[in-house]
Amino acid sequence: MTTATSTTARDRLSTTGVWYFTDGMSSGQAAEAAGRIESLGYSTLWLPDTVGRDPFAHMAWLASQTTTLQYATGIANIFHRHPGPMKQAANTLAEQTGGRFVLGLGVSHGPMVAGLRGLDYSKPLTKMRDYLAAMKTQPYRGIAPEDEPLVLLAALGPKMLELSATAADGAHPYWTTPEHTAMARAAIGPDALLCVEQKVVFTTDADAARAAGNQQIDRYAALPNYRNNWIRLGFTDEEIEQRAHRFVDAVVVWGDEDRVHAGVQAHYDAGADHVCVQPVNPDMSADIDWNVLELLAPS
């Protein structure tokens, strides 16, 4: 069901997308979800690279079941793949999907790389710089995609943001705020892409919203790159540890229709080209909250 169109990947990223884990779904359920996301007018579905499905193989399946939806890795871990195979996977997907693929790359975190995989995590910024240079020199003998896939970096701090603008096509910040989006736009300049992720809980019940937000934070608070960025944004270790309302309400958008729309729009107003919404279910289940996606649907 692959469809090639004249619309470019960059054009698609001018429309809001969705960021979501599909590992709890069967392959058929994931395809149904992707089709529904496509029907709602979202441009891009972002999928992670952790310990679940291989994102490239999964996207090949999902793309075969959809016609216009673009797929992006959020993010593919550079420590887990040689630059050559990474380029092969990216070019293959871009060619097979008619350009509906964006390669998000990142250095992940020490606990995921050194702790889980037993790999060397020293000098991640240098590793990323060298990795991008190596990808450009790696051979690819398959039929080339009409356009090279866009490459975005998981960038939070100033040095990685700078690299995302000078050695890639832009940045994909995760777990941030509109204040960080404004800072990131200033750092990367007007031309590089800025594609930010935002978790959204659609409920006016403050306790339920914060509980759902805290559940999400629990999964990430021990990862140093996110924690360091939250501290750079002005939150204290105590606020992060105690899940202070000021902290939770800043990194998780929740509330009624107006407040949810405003929370996403704030990133666009701060300079984002694309916001990928991660719908968080207020009942704290792993089920996708379609109420969020229907509320924010571009169509």
Image (spheres, helix red, strand yellow):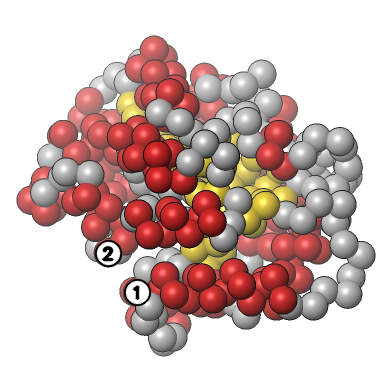
Horizontal side of residue 253 vs 47, given as left or right: left
Residue beneath label 1, please?
110
Q: In front: 88, or 113?
A: 88
Q: Earlier in the sequence, mark 2 or mark 1?
A: 1
Q: Helix, strand, or loop for circle 1?
A: helix
Q: Is residue 274 above or below residue 100?
A: above
In contact (CB < 8 Å): disc 2 and disc 1: yes
| Quarter of the view holding residue 103 | bottom right
The quarter of the image holding the N terminus is top right
Between the residue at mark 2 and the residue at mark 1, the CA separation in whole angstroms equals 8 Å
Q: In front: 149, or 252?
A: 149
Horizontal side of residue 155 vs 138, given as left or right: left
Given the current orientation, which residue lies at the most extreme top position? 258
Q: Helix, strand, or loop for circle 2?
A: helix
Residue 49, image x and y in percent? 54, 63
Residue 292, image x and y in percent? 48, 26
Residue 283 in view:
no
On residue 52, which mark appears?
none
Label 2 crowding class (10 Å Cα cut-off): few <14, some 14-19, many 20+? some
Q: In front: 27, or 118?
A: 118
Residue at 39%, 24% (x, y): give it. 266
Horizontal side of residue 180 vs 241, given as left or right: right
Label 1 crowding class (10 Å Cα cut-off): few <14, some 14-19, many 20+? some
The quarter of the image holding the C terminus is top right
Residue 69 in view:
yes
Q: In front: 69, or 231?
A: 231
Question: The disc labelled 2 sits on which kind of residue?
Answer: Pro
Residue 36, image x and y in percent? 68, 32
On residue 224, which mark appears?
2
Residue at 72%, 27% (x, y): give it. 39
Residue at 44%, 55% (x, y): give it. 162
Residue 59, image x and y in percent? 71, 55
